[in-house]
Amino acid sequence: LVESDAIGTIGVGESTIPPLVTYNRLLGIGEADFMRATQATFKLGILFDGWKDGSDRYFHSFGITGQDHWSAGFQHFWLNGRERGHDAAYDAYCLELVAALEGKFAHLPDERMNYAYQLDSSLYAQFLRRMAEADGTRRIEGRIAHVALDGESGDVAGLHLESGAVVEGDLFLDCTGFRA
């Protein structure tokens, strides 16, 4: 990892989506430790206030509404029920939406609650760096001055740092964000 303390990270509250929960699980990250380290909160969807004409609200939940059947999607059964006088709102059949609007959250035994996090992205970067270093990643302090390319393939051959050091490798990932 080549990184410079002179270049700050963008430290904003980051809105994530449910695949981050899966990603953290794949990395073996304990959720409580992660949440403490990143000042994260649980998130069940995204609320859009004033989406259409300034007064509308739309909540995009991370859940699935209703349960499909092999013969048709849930929305068809719901619409049929409406025609027959059933007046429950479509939203009432989405666990995440109902929970979010009531300010509730729970880890369910069958993991059927889909959620994500709101977190501090700078703290998450630091958390991942500490984890990577604990697993053997070597961090090199410095700024990249020049990227050397292989003359024939055009692949990255090495990184020349401002200090004069050269970092060679087989695989390079550019995680510089806006500077990429």
Image (cartoon, grey):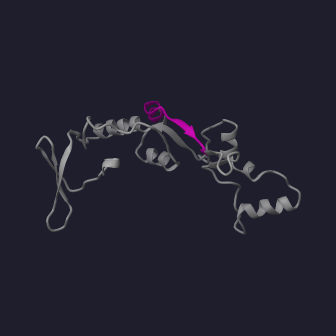
Q: Is residue 66 left or right of residue 82?
A: left
Q: Between 12 and 77, which is closer to the camera in this rendering? A: 12
The image quadrant where one finds the N terminus is top left
Q: Is residue 141 left or right of residue 41?
A: left
Q: Is residue 64 left or right of residue 163?
A: right
Residue 40 pos. (x, y %): 50, 35
For the point 73% across and 50% down, the residue is 91
Q: Note whether 33 is above or below 174 in the view shown.
A: above
Residue 125 pos. (x, y %): 37, 39
Residue 157 within the magenta-colored segment of the rendering: no
**How many callouts does the rendering have?**
0
Residue 112 pos. (x, y %): 61, 48
Residue 101, picture quadrant: top right
Q: Between 72 and 165, which is closer to the camera in this rendering? A: 165
Q: Note whether 74 is above or below 109 in the view shown.
A: below
- Residue span colored magenta: 33-46
Tell which residue pokes out farthest to the left in this image.
164
Residue 109 pos. (x, y %): 61, 42
For the point 78% across and 59% down, the residue is 78
